[in-house]
Amino acid sequence: MEHISKRPVYLNLFKIRLPIGGVVSILHRVTGVFLVLLLPPAIYLLQQSLQSAATFESTVRILGSLPGRALLLIVTWMFVQHLYSGIRHLLLDVDIGVERTTARRSAWLTLVVSVVTLLLIGLWMT
Amino acid sequence: MTIRFSIYRYNPENDRRPYMQSYELQNDCGAVMLLDALLLIKQQDDSLSFRRSCREGVCGSDAVNINGRNGLACITPLKDLKQPVEVRPLPGRPVIRDLVVDLSQFYAQYRAVKPWLINNDPVPEIERLQSPAERDSLDGLYECILCACCSTSCPSFWWNPDRFLGPAALLQAWRFLADSRDQATGERLDDLEDPYRLFRCHTIMNCVEVCPKELNPTRAISQIKEMLVRRSL
Amino acid sequence: MRPRPTGSAHSGLGEWLLQRVTAVYMGVFVLYFVLRFAIAPIDVYAAWKVWFASVAVRIGFALFFASALLHSWVGMRSVFMDYVKPMWLRFVVQLVTATVLLILALWVAQILLGNT
Ligand code: SF4
Ligand code: SF4
Ligand code: FES
């Protein structure tokens, strides 16, 4: 079967159409990896907030500053997108919404609801 | 007016690498489905290779990637397709020539789920009976024509073709797990319980998107998972 | 019984379930946390300390971080299984990930057990 390995394989990800469910799924993955990377800073902030009144103040200040809030918003988007697509996966697991059309709709829904959540939080933060 | 096509070409004897070739057909050429068009193009250029047989969506041999989406050429209406119609082989499989891919691994995976009834009771005189409800549970499972549209659209299958069974084989695994006459449920589940064969499925549902028979491998896969969970509790 | 087919020592089922159980816990915890602070925000250090001094809150946090770290492990492992093909490289990245997550676990434990 040696010759088989020499055969070309067609796998051009830019030419293969990724359905919306696939888009949400890969987003779930990407946001998940980013969230893991954010664990250490999150733990650090928790530690700072508890250490002393001074470090608490500076933590609040950092988070409340403009870049801090912008960063917080991005992180929040990643979190809610991951959360909502995760909930969608859980529902699919228990046989809810596994039909092609509903699955497409719920995939779109996670994107929309994430952005709406973000807007609400943004409004609330200002 | 013409209909424009762009088709993936590769001939292992002459070509070092695959390329896209343009073809045109007259608007009034009479082709309704993409397969008709491919056959007309083959009259222009008989070096073009592709598989087909039944030309009515039953044999599953003419699955190709059409404008980025897997489907059967014979039941894909030409008029719905954006031009130039880009036709490529099924993704992720070794290309033998043009649109013909090597599906041996796909068939091996099908074989690996033991797609036959296992029942050690003596064969009854007439038939093994099922209640209508038991028979109904096989609907949406047995209709699979093994066209490979689903498995070759599944990212998990692209990354782990050697160890993940892929949606088509898993649909058939469930078809026999769900069969009231089958007695090998335990063994079948054992075979699936490893990190790859079944659990590489991340519920992406690309498979459901493309199945020309509108079957639902994702549902079959979650049902297998549910059965595994039940068993372990 | 027939021997299991080859593969890793883990059955995929355990990880798959773990991923879901931890996800549900984190979801519930975050919901509680957000609601708690939306209703009655805490913005002074003393109040934050008092809230955090409660054993229930600490247990809640401990379970949250345990879930997050386990969830991270299963998730990252899954990512590596899909994209990192050379076995030695996969072994290395998994080892690094596991070590980092363990260190994070110790760090969290230190925070949660410390300064009451
Ligand atoms: S499940 Fe559908 S797409 Fe997959 S092989 Fe069977 S018929 Fe083809
Ligand atoms: S649902 Fe599972 S089998 Fe279907 S495309 Fe997604 S990963 Fe593949
Ligand atoms: S030719 Fe048989 S399915 Fe298309």
Image (spheres, coloured by chain):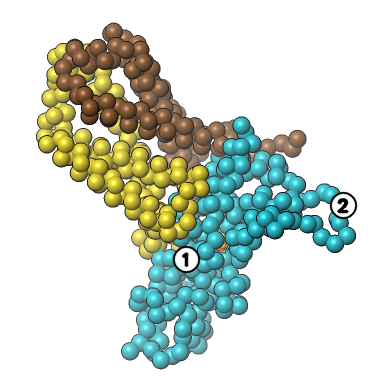
Chain colours: A yellow, B cyan, C brown
Q: Which residue is mark 1?
A: B70
Residue B79 image offset from top left, x and y in percent: 39, 80
Q: Residue at x 35, y 28 (%)?
A: C29
> Observer-nearest residue: B223 or C91?
B223
Q: Quadrant of the C terminus of chain B?
A: top right
Q: Is residue A56 above or below residue B55?
A: above
- Locate residue C26 relative to residue B216 in the image: left or right: left
Task: Mark 1 and ligand 1: say if the CB distance to the nearest ligand atom is below 8 Å.
Answer: yes
Residue type highlighted by circle 1:
Asn
> How far apart, in angstroms, are the residues tagged by discs 1 and 2?
43 Å
> Observer-nearest residue: C35 or B77?
C35
Q: Which residue is mark 2?
A: B122
Q: Are marks 1 and 2 in contact (CB under 8 Å)?
A: no
Chain bearing tag 2 is: B
To which quarter of the image does residue C65 belong?
top left
Residue A15 image offset from top left, x and y in percent: 37, 63
Q: Residue at x 75, y 47 (%)?
A: B183
Q: Residue furthest top?
A: C116
Q: Is residue B64 above or below residue B111?
A: below
Residue type highlighted by circle 2:
Pro
